[in-house]
Image (cartoon, rainbow, N blue to C red):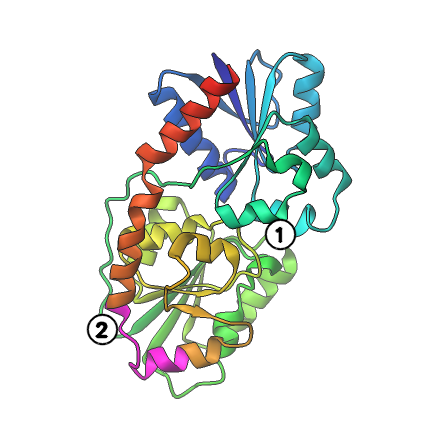
Amino acid sequence: MKVCVASPYPLSELKGNSVTTDRIVAMLNEGGVEARGSYGNDGEPADILITLHAIKGAPAVFDFKKKTPNGRVIILLTGTDIYQGLAEGSQIGGDALQVADRIVVPQEAALRKLPEKVRGKTVVIRPSLDPIAVKATSSQSPFVISVVGHLRPVKRPFLTIETLAQHPEWSDLEVWQIGQALDAEMRKTAEFWMEEDKRYRWCGGLPREESLALCAKSSLTINSSILEGGANAVLEAMTMGVPVLASRIEGNVGLMGDDYPGYFEEGGMAKALEAIMHQRVDLDEWSLLLADRLPLFSRVRESESWLELLIELK
């Protein structure tokens, strides 16, 4: 069996899609499947195409079906598919879902967002991570907050520093923004904050190993996204033992659990940070709660789920 795992972005780019593509390819190869990653459909022979994104991956789906009419298609949906593009009625995304033999979502809550007519061919496969050797090594001073993810509006990358700017008295604090600016406006804003608030440091886009090392040194990491399917950065922090403060959205809740105390509601980041800075919450307890969730996201579990799905379609 030959499988092509297609990303809508070049695999050399430092994006979550590249990380996911590489992980799936590695798991399938370890399971005895001849799998390869590609930027879109590479046109090489394959029995099954797994594509990330229904909307951005739609050209790969249609190209594959044109060249390989009897080939099978699996679409792995992302957060921007589930909570934005498809929810807003994307025609090309909807057409791709109709063509797909199976659809994969990262969490149960995402099923409710899909059209009823495709739910029957949709399965849940929770993401995992490649093993991470580095573990949390934060110091007491300064209190470092990491914000990990490429700078784009859906991530609300500057919400943390905008909130902290209202509290100049929190001087023994630093914000490490880790991620590539995906447009000129984001770069301009990051550079503004570096001049405006000396507690803020924009690290730019970094190789994964460097990003992990910085996150591990932070006392807290924040995910303030408007929508997520399940952020790699959150799962990485969980694995390393770094406590997470996150927006209460389905993608984050799917990773950390409904009862996790480290969420903030819309407009509630300032209140949440005040509680943390005044030591009214136990961040060590947050880390332990996140560690209890990790078995749900084991590599073995994800690998078995993908291999079972391929056998089903064979």
| Disc 1 target residue | 83
Residue 207 placement (x, y as % from top left): 40, 45
Quarter occupied by residue 298: top left
Residue at 68 percent across and 45 percent down: it is 86
Residue at 37 percent across and 30 percent down: it is 303
Residue 135 placement (x, y as % from top left): 23, 53
Amino acid type for the residue under numbered disc 1:
Tyr
Residue 262 placement (x, y as % from top left): 38, 68
What residue occupies the far bottom of the structure in this picture?
A: 169
Judge whether 67 appears above or below 152 on screen. above
Judge whether 128 appears above or below 68 on screen. below
Q: Is residue 187 left or right of residue 125?
A: right
Residue 296 versus residue 220: which sits nearer the camera?
296
Q: Is residue 237 left or right of residue 148?
A: left
Q: Residues within 10 Å of mark 2 (few under 14, many from 20)?
A: few
Which of labels 1 and 2 is toward the front?
1
Q: Is residue 18 left or right of residue 9?
A: left
| Disc 2 target residue | 140
Amino acid type for the residue under numbered disc 2:
Gln
| 277 falls in the magenta region | yes
- N-terminal of the pair, mark 1 or mark 2, is 1
